Amino acid sequence: MTTDILTVTALKKYFVIGRTGWLKRRQTITVKAVDGVSFTIHEGETFGLVGESGSGKSTVAYTTIGMYRPTAGSIKFQGEELFQANGRRPLHLRKAIQIVFQDPGSSLNPRRNIQQILELPLHIHQPEKNSLEQVIHLLEIVGLPPEYMYKYPHMLSGGEKQIVAIARALATAPSLVILDEPTSALDVSVQAKTINLLLRLQREFHLSYLFITHDLSLMRNVASRVAIMYLGKICEVAETTDFFQKPLHPYTQMLLSSIPVITEEEAELKPKKVISTGEIPSPVNVPSGCSFHTRCPFAMDICSKIDPLMVEVNPGHLVRCHLFPQPNQETLISADERR
Ligand code: SF4
C-alpha cells in the first residue's frame, strides 16, 4: 500500500504587482502564478512536475518549501498542515522538506567554505551533534573527499557545487527533497552523474522527490508519476508510462509530439503531431475558460467559457479537458457564472 508523504490541495499563490498606467496612475495587477493546484506525492517516489517557463512549477516548489505563503489552499506533510494559522512552519516540518536549486553558483554563499556551508543547517537542526564529523559524513555520502570542506564555491566545478548543494539538503535528514531543475545549469557530461547520485541517495535514504523540470526526456527516465502544468494549473497527471504512451490532454500531446526520438520503438509511441494554433499567453492575462484554448487545435465553444475540472479518466490518470466527460455540467456552468 502506498502512503502519501505530501498532499497539496487547491493551492493558490497570487502575486499583486504595481505598475504605472495611463496618466501615470498607479495600477495593480494580480498574477495567478499557481491557481488551484492539487496533487499527492507517495513515500519513496519521484513525482515529476513539468511545464514551460512561467507555468508556475517553481512557485509550487517555493511555496512548499515555505519561501512563499500560499494565498489559499493546503499543503500537508504526512497529514500535518505545513503552515500554521500564523503563517509559520513548525521546525520539524522545515527539517523534513529540503530543496536543491537550479543554479548551484548562486545558491551557495561565496564567502563561506564548504565546511561552513554544510555546518549551517546542522547548527540549526542538530546542534547536539559534532558538526565536523557530520560534515565529513555528508561529503562521504555524496562522494566528495573530506578535504573539500576547506574549499570555497569558486574553487569547484558546476557539478561539484551542485553535489555540495545536495549534501546541504541532506544535512537535516529530510524525507522529501524538492529538486528544482537540478541539472539544467550543468554541462551535459555531468548531468547523468548528478542524476545517478540523486537516484542512489533516494534508494539509500528512502527519499521522496518532487522533481521539477521542463525536460520531458529526463522525466521519462526518473519519475514514477508525472504532472504537467500550464499557466498555473495542472492539466494532466499520470503514471510515467501512461503519460508518455497514452497522453490525453492536447497540451501534453503537443509537447510530447515535439520531442526528438532516437529508436523506432520511441517513434511508434510518439503521439501524432499536434500543432499549436496561437501565441503563448502572458501569465498576467490568462485566457478565460480553459487557459489553453487560444492554442488548442481541438478547442470548442465551451472551452473559452468554462474552465474544465480535473477528471479521472483511467485509474490514476487525471485530465482537465472538455474532450472528456465532466462530472456535472450544470453545476460547472453555474459555478463558472458565479465567478
Ligand atoms: Fe483544448 Fe478545450 Fe481541452 Fe482546453 S478544454 S485542452 S481548449 S479541447
Image: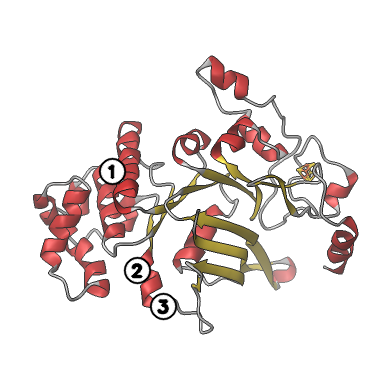
Question: Label 1's element?
Answer: helix
Indicate left or right for 5 with 330 as reference.
left
Tag 3 residue: 90
| Nearer to us: label 3 or label 1 | 3
Q: Residues within 10 Å of mark 1 (few under 14, many from 20)?
A: some
Q: Residue at x 86, y 57 (%)?
A: 328
Viewer-nearest residue: 88 or 78:
78
Q: Residue at x 55, y 44 (%)?
A: 226
**Residue 177 % position (x, y):** 39, 56
Viewer-nearest residue: 7 or 86:
7
Question: Label 2's element?
Answer: helix
Amino acid under disc 2:
Lys
Q: Residues within 10 Å of mark 3 (few under 14, many from 20)?
A: few
Tag 2 residue: 95
Q: Compared to 331, does 269 lie above or below?
A: above
Identify the disc placed on residue 158.
1
